[in-house]
Amino acid sequence: MGDILTVKNLTTHYTTPDGPAEAAGDVSFTVKKGEMLGLIGESGCGKSTIASSILRLIEYPGKIVSGEVILDGIDLIRAKDKELEKIRWKDIAVIPQSAMNSLNPVYTVGDQIIESILLHEDVTKKEALERTKNLLELVGIDKGRWKSYPHEFSGGMKQRVAIAMALSCNPKLIISDESTTGLDVLTQAQVIALMKDLQERLDLSIIMISHDLPLVTSICDRIAIMYAGKIIEWASTKEILEDARHPYSQGLLNATPDLLNPDKEVTSIPGSVPNLVHPPSGCRFRDRCQFVMESCAEKIPPLLEIKEGHHVACILEEGDDNE
């Protein structure tokens, strides 16, 4: 599978009274055609900032400082606004965190999907309506409900409408930004199963942003783990589960209960994420790391490919390479 999206050295800051906060620092990763990539980390680590930066929707006090976001040979960071208007929704779509807030309460769900189709596709209103009905059926909603208003739907159905809207212009890539947060466990499982089914049937590429490690490992092909604005490990889901190398990745796995292994000891990661206005020198995880060494304060460890497809940013891995 070839890469559909390439993010290179992307850095995004937020202006604060105390100085710039580096919400995303020198972030690099790729998304392959037809794969689901999980982007995971604690709240505030920069996941949603990455999503907004990819779409170039960062507004003041946010600012994209440097980097590239390449989609089909086009750098979205440097593309003109009119070019971006054509790319958003048609080539890249977003499933928002809260469908309740993203759907307009005074329009029917069908009219909202139709509007997005007419804005980006050269079709008649009749054709857009027919596509809308098909999309609703695709996500498990009776097509006759296109005339319903958002308040007539449950939370799970609203989320399905948001998925249908994201699919409305046949995008190459979908960014799901914590789209199951706030749903009950049963509804969450249904929505996740639906997204995985659609990804496989339609050969979609999806970036699944979440803080829920069990959820991401259950459906994603590869996982990129973020900490304090940086990707610290990036590999296949199998590699992360069986051979996580970064101490933070190991800590996340150890902090996750295992229903198949009830005797597993669950341990938390001590401390808290650093202040991104005044981050610590060197490795940003060093104040919480059980393997910390003096050299960890000297430089920010680069994201190295320690074996094919497995990238880690940790001085312990640099040491292995140098021996």
Image: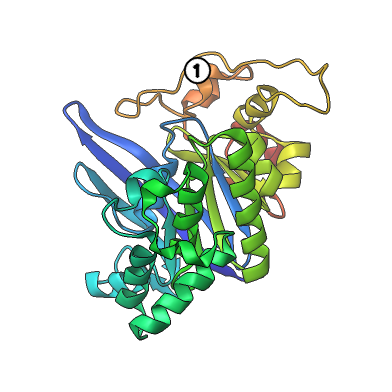
Q: Position of residue 240 (x, y in %)?
A: 70, 40
Q: Which of 249 and 299 is in front in this view?
A: 249
**Left or right, residue 255 beside residue 71:** right
Q: Name the residue under label 1.
A: 287
Q: Position of residue 245 (x, y in %)?
A: 69, 35
**Left or right, residue 223 beside residue 166:** right
Q: Residues within 10 Å of mark 1 (few under 14, many from 20)?
A: some
User: Is residue 318 visible to us here?
Assistant: no
Which image quarter holds the C terminus? top right
Residue in the picture at 37% in, 46% down: 151
Residue in the picture at 83% in, 28% down: 260
Task: Locate residue 121: give its quadrant.
Answer: bottom left
Q: Position of residue 41 (x, y in %)?
A: 52, 35
Amino acid bearing label 1: Asp
Q: Position of residue 309 (x, y in %)?
A: 68, 54
Task: Locate residue 44: give its quadrant.
Answer: top left
